[in-house]
Image (tube, coloured by chain):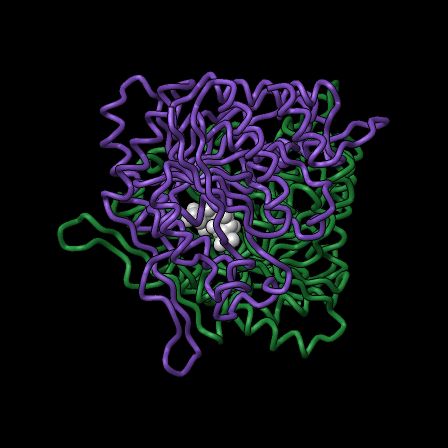
Chain colours: A green, B purple
Amino acid sequence: MKLNIAVLPGDGIGPEVVEQALNATIAVCEKFNHELNYKHALVGACAIDETGNPYPDATHELCMQSDAVLFGAIGAPKYDNDPSATVRPEQGLLAMRKKLGLFANIRPVTTFPSLVHKSPLRADLIEGADFMCIRELTGGLYFGRPQGRSEDGNTAYDTCVYSRYEIERIVRLAFEYAMQRRKKLTVVDKANILATSRLWREVAREISKDFPEVETEYLFVDNAAMRMIQWPKSFDVMVTENMFGDILTDEGSVITGSMGLLPSASIGAHTSVFEPIHGSYPQAAGKNIANPLATILSAAMMLEYAFGLKEEAELITKAVAASMDANVVTEDIASEGVKPSSTSEVGQWIVNYI
Amino acid sequence: MKLNIAVLPGDGIGPEVVEQALNATIAVCEKFNHELNYKHALVGACAIDETGNPYPDATHELCMQSDAVLFGAIGAPKYDNDPSATVRPEQGLLAMRKKLGLFANIRPVTTFPSLVHKSPLRADLIEGADFMCIRELTGGLYFGRPQGRSEDGNTAYDTCVYSRYEIERIVRLAFEYAMQRRKKLTVVDKANILATSRLWREVAREISKDFPEVETEYLFVDNAAMRMIQWPKSFDVMVTENMFGDILTDEGSVITGSMGLLPSASIGAHTSVFEPIHGSYPQAAGKNIANPLATILSAAMMLEYAFGLKEEAELITKAVAASMDANVVTEDIASEGVKPSSTSEVGQWIVNYI
Ligand SMILES: CC(C)[C@H](C(=O)O)[C@@H](O)C(=O)O
Ligand SMILES: CC(C)[C@H](C(=O)O)[C@@H](O)C(=O)O
């Protein structure tokens, strides 16, 4: 098979972890005789520094021509404390989401037995939790217009908009994932307050008829935020709109204690983007200490989701598990008494295993 | 002193728990020689059943004439699964918030040493956590217009609006609370995305100049949702807009494991409302098993916040702590081997103590 991928390392620890994920991908492609073509491009703060644009046209072109995008992280401290600056790294993220039509962000929330003790939750609550958050990524408050200030500057407004079509495609996707899993879908909204949520619920009710085997439940967002902490094992697949998803997926990412291991996929019409859920973590940049596993697992997700290469994806997942069993891990997840390995040592171990 | 209060028991377990809170208030007023006048009124599902309106005019009149409102809970199962029904109990809540101008919802998040084992969080993370969530309650997405559907029904929209004035009064209140506590304020927003959040941050920055002693930090809502789980002790006072506050205050309420004990206050221009944060819990209604402590502590908040009666409030708080020490508690918080008491037994014990 021929795989054309765009590699967007971004900022902070992005380049270091992406390098390891790319090496793992190269290794697995060699092993299975796939032809892997990859090209690098700029995104985020480094793209602003070089071109003035956090998502340069050249980067977009490359993404559009690729079958999948392997992404690191964006964000740099110098932009952090000024959310109203005119050019910011996050704008690159938003532009990429919109231009590539990345409508569904998928985040598996899984626990790793050896890391359960790192979870802020009681072990009995989190052990064995395994669910998937699906967040709408190109609509809602993030992109709704009008947005801005009144003429006198004393009033500000944002708009949340959703069309039936936007809801349909992501809810359908969520049902399809539920069918491949434990057949339970939780639709999260605030239908007792928001008109957009009432449309979400209406559309989800209609589509649920096409999936009679799936048990569908509707949960208000405030209840979902509570239940994720009190009873994470009660979820299988959860789907929600953009802003609620921003909050809930981040909540989901910390309950497992394995933030450094969680990959994500953003599904688009033309191409999809695969990235670790941790951020650019600038404090660790350039030190060769960042955990590359979430990005390596994102590469596994890419092989499976973008190319249907299940066996290849599984080999990477197995290699990651083996590296943990062998205690070849970075300091963030090293158990007491275990000497931490560097980012590149972990990556190299995984390449050798493959 | 003369205290005029409106008593709105509402639905589900509301009437049972409010009765005990009222008894405690009567007892403390007798002891301190205050004249307590109280009148009951309908709100919620029971008000719909009786008058067709979840917040009848007569109830509003009574609230306006009172110095404070003691509130139970609203909501009934028959309305639960139809968020688009034309008359719903929650509309009573929203109407009350808007008509009484209850702009700030205040929820202390405190841990009780004897209940730490009930928390979903690891004991070392939650033990000793003590913060206050302040949620804006009459603006934002909840009340912004336009809200609705396009003519063809295929698009829905909501509007988030905030004026400088709305932000100013609640942020100032938050700074004042911070001054009385550990002098740390966390302003939660999504200023990297929302125009309303950028106005929040701008106003908060301005007001912070009047409180140089307070350490002010700005946190994106997704980060706040994570940090509340990972590091709840890092918060002192948190202030945020309505929708984010809905999610974060509920998240805050479950991390302590003492949901049945948490009171709240909604501060208004004319009068303020005091209520437990747990809901109407219809499954337990009429069984005399519901935990009255959150409502009794809400009565204590009322004495302190609405009437400045600190000593009286402290006596109630002391009585509640004593009832727990004496193991006179309802089944939700009874330790193993302890015979649970009924709602009215707990209430009576507290009255006797006072
Ligand atoms: C950086 C920010 C704009 C972004 C978002 O809110 O979507 C981030 O929080 C995320 O979840 O990817
Ligand atoms: C019942 C509902 C409208 C309400 C809200 O969203 O404000 C509730 O969740 C709350 O927090 O008081």
Quarter where residue B156 is shown:
bottom left
Residue B229 visible, this angle: no
Q: Is residue B289 visible?
A: yes
Residue found at x 65% / y 41% = A229
Coordinates of residue B205 in the picture (x, y in percent): 26, 32
Which of A99/A169 is in front? A169
Q: In what quadrant of the picture does the C terminus of chain B appear? A: top right
Q: Position of residue A42 (x, y in %)?
A: 40, 50
Between residue B61 and residue A74, name the one nearer to us: B61
Residue lying at the far right in this picture: please name it: B337
Q: Quadrant of the N terminus of chain B?
A: top left
Residue A37 image position (x, y, % from top left): 56, 60
- Say which residue appears at 36% left-offset and 49% top-offset: B138
| In this rendering, position of residue A158 left or right of residue B223 | left
Residue B161 relative to residue A244: left or right: left
- On screen, residue B201 versus residue B308, left or right, reads left
* Residue B319 in the image: above or below residue B202: above
Q: How many marks?
A: 0
| Residue at screen point 74% across, 59% down | A32
Between residue A54 and residue B184, name the one nearer to us.
B184
Q: Residue at x 48, y 20 (%)?
A: B312
Task: Decide which of A266, B23 is in the foreground and name it.
Answer: B23
Kindly give the residue lying farthest to the bottom in the view shown: B152
Relative to B14, does residue A133 appear above or below in the rendering? below
B123 up-or-down from B264: above or below: above
Q: Position of residue B39 (x, y in %)?
A: 46, 43
